[in-house]
Image: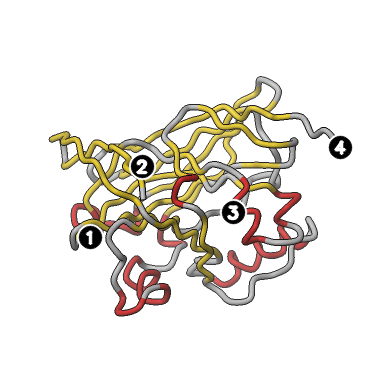
Amino acid sequence: MFDLTFTVDAQGTNTPLTLAIDQMVIAGWTGRDPVARDKHIKELQEMGIAPPASTPIYYRASARRLTQEDSIECTGGDSSGEVEFVLIGWQGRIFVGCGSDHTDRKVEAYSVTVSKQMCDKPIASTLWELEDVIGHWDKMILRSYATIKGERMLYQEGTLDAMLPVADLIARGFPGGKLPDGCAMFGGTFAAKGGIRPADRFDFELEDPVLKRTIRHGYDVVTLPVRG
């Protein structure tokens, strides 16, 4: 267990909140549309990554892989980011954030579970109350930008109506249909525009077009050399 300090944006009122995080769950294949879901599965199969055992599927990774830093270090040049919404349970409440499931694609080709443990998972420092956005959940937008060789480009974009509803996502992954206190769950992602590829920098955001606010974060990717 370790602490992360966030700012809770309650429609203009910002309140600091320190949460004790003791588990991280990365939900995969959470698409509501089976056609779009299968497209992403095919995208990864073309990279040699086996299809999932179930859809959705709930991978586990060390909670200490969560970071709010503005850079991460990765071994080799085979990793890439994925924008996702993040749900965090705390004292019966659920907060909504935004993070990147940064993953080593070379490792993913032989073990998705191991790949989830290989890289830090950047998360923005701002959270929203789920109850403030659940009424217009499907209208919210996930978006990411990749900077490759100095060029910043739109990498992913989509609305949350493409994902399983929150209640359904939680019910399928946790006994009693409740997100445990101290659990941070990544909720799935969209196919990359132009295909999955590494970047020097990755920026991501969750936009609420109804309440006109956005959670943002970005990080540089420092590539460590592979020696033998």
Q: Residue at x 34, y 66 (%)?
A: 166
Task: Please tell me in which quadrant of the rendered image residue 120 appears.
Answer: top right
The Cα atoms of the two marked residues, 4 and 1, are separated by 53 Å
Tell me if label 1 and label 2 are in contact, CB under 8 Å: no
Residue type, label 3: Lys
- The number of discs equals 4
Task: Residue 172 in the image: state x and y as whole percent.
Answer: 41, 76
* Image: 78 above or below 57: above
Residue type, label 2: Glu
Residue at the farthest top position: 150
The Cα atoms of the two marked residues, 1 and 2, are separated by 15 Å
Label 4: which secondary element: loop
Nearer the observer: mark 4 or 1; the answer is 4
- Going from the N terminus, do you reach mark 4 or mark 1 first? 1
- Going from the N terminus, do you reach mark 1 or mark 3 first? 3
- Going from the N terminus, do you reach mark 4 or mark 3 first? 3
* Image: 43 above or below 54: above
**Residue position marked by numbered label 4 in the rendering:** 228
Label 3: which secondary element: helix
**Residue position marked by numbered label 2 in the rendering:** 207
The Cα atoms of the two marked residues, 2 and 3, are separated by 25 Å
**Residue position marked by numbered label 1 in the rendering:** 135
Residue type, label 1: Gly
Q: Residues within 10 Å of mark 1 (few under 14, many from 20)?
A: few
Q: Residues within 10 Å of mark 3 (few under 14, many from 20)?
A: many
